[in-house]
Image: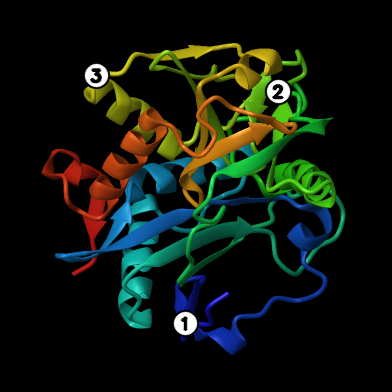
Amino acid sequence: MQKVPYIWKNGKFLNWDDAKTHLITHTLHYSAGAFEGIRFYDTKKGPAIFRLKEHTKRLFYSAKALDMKMQYSQKEINEAIIKLIKKNKIKKGYIRPLVYYGEGRMGLSTKGFLPDTMIAAWGWGSYLGEHAVRVKISKYMRIHPASTVSDAKLCGHYTNSILASIDAYKNGYDEALLLDYKGHVAEGPGENIFMVKQKTIYTPSVGTILPGITRDAIMTLARDLGYKVVEKNIKPEELKRADEAFFTGTAAEVSPISSIDGKKLKLAEGGPVTMHLKEEFLKIVNGENKKYSKWLTVVQ
């Protein structure tokens, strides 16, 4: 991780080395926290944050799922993010807002306990690399929707993702893929998934997945480009017979998939639909398509 001069915490800019929390921190022990991952890009107009308002809105939704009493408004968080990028003088990278319970209490009750809020921003390249990824269907199931608020981005959910990732890496794969409790394709540990069959794009229905903001952008973009996009339950066998498949996410952006459980897809190194969407998506985030300029918040 690239070390930067400042991190924002509870309304103040702290030096990187001074941004610390205590070992007896509630969220460290019990995982009750909400976070976001946001990218910003180097455009001709300056650093531009991709779908800032949508990400902040989801942060507040996730915090509400934990009954967290936010100490700042969405507007204040957005302004803090913009100021942090300016102060750190970074042209492109990744933003991590986190709302968590800090020092002061043990035990599972959070009644009357006010959360801390922090924002970090640093340079970060491609999450899954530049090549098509080899995927393993995980032995771990995606968290049951009746066990949690499955469309919230909560810290505790990512233990599920970490277990799936460890299993995939140990078995020589680049990434995992989790199924839902019905055995349908759900999502990657930190990505949504799409498949392409005869130039029609399919993606798992909402209900057991995190409905990603990049997922939404790709669905909108694909339809604008003339592709048919269908949300449906997808069986693992269907996915393995797809012409193309790809992951989407803030960190992953658009990442082609080469194989599932060792079975190569027909267009294994990134088919024409995947690469078309990737190319057009990168134009958008780099400020080269005015049609989608509303998705960018330029830091000036």
Residue plotted at (79% across, 49% down):
172
Give the labeled residue for mark 2: 145
Quadrant occupied by the N terminus: bottom right
Q: Quadrant of residue 189?
A: top right
User: Which amino acid type is shown beneath numbered disc 2?
Assistant: Pro
Mark 1 or mark 3: which comes first in sequence?
Answer: 1
Residue plotted at (41% across, 57% down):
39
- Residue 182 x/y as whole percent: 75, 13
Q: Is residue 78 above or below residue 294?
A: below
User: Does residue 66 appear anywhere in the picture?
Assistant: no
Q: Is residue 137 above or below residue 295?
A: above
* Foreground pick, 252 / 48: 252
- Residue 155 x/y as whole percent: 68, 49
Residue plotted at (63% across, 13% down):
238
As measured in the structure, the alpha-carbon distance from the residue carrying label 2 to the one carrying label 1 is 37 Å
Give the labeled residue for mark 1: 6
Quadrant occupied by the C terminus: bottom left
Give the labeled residue for mark 3: 226
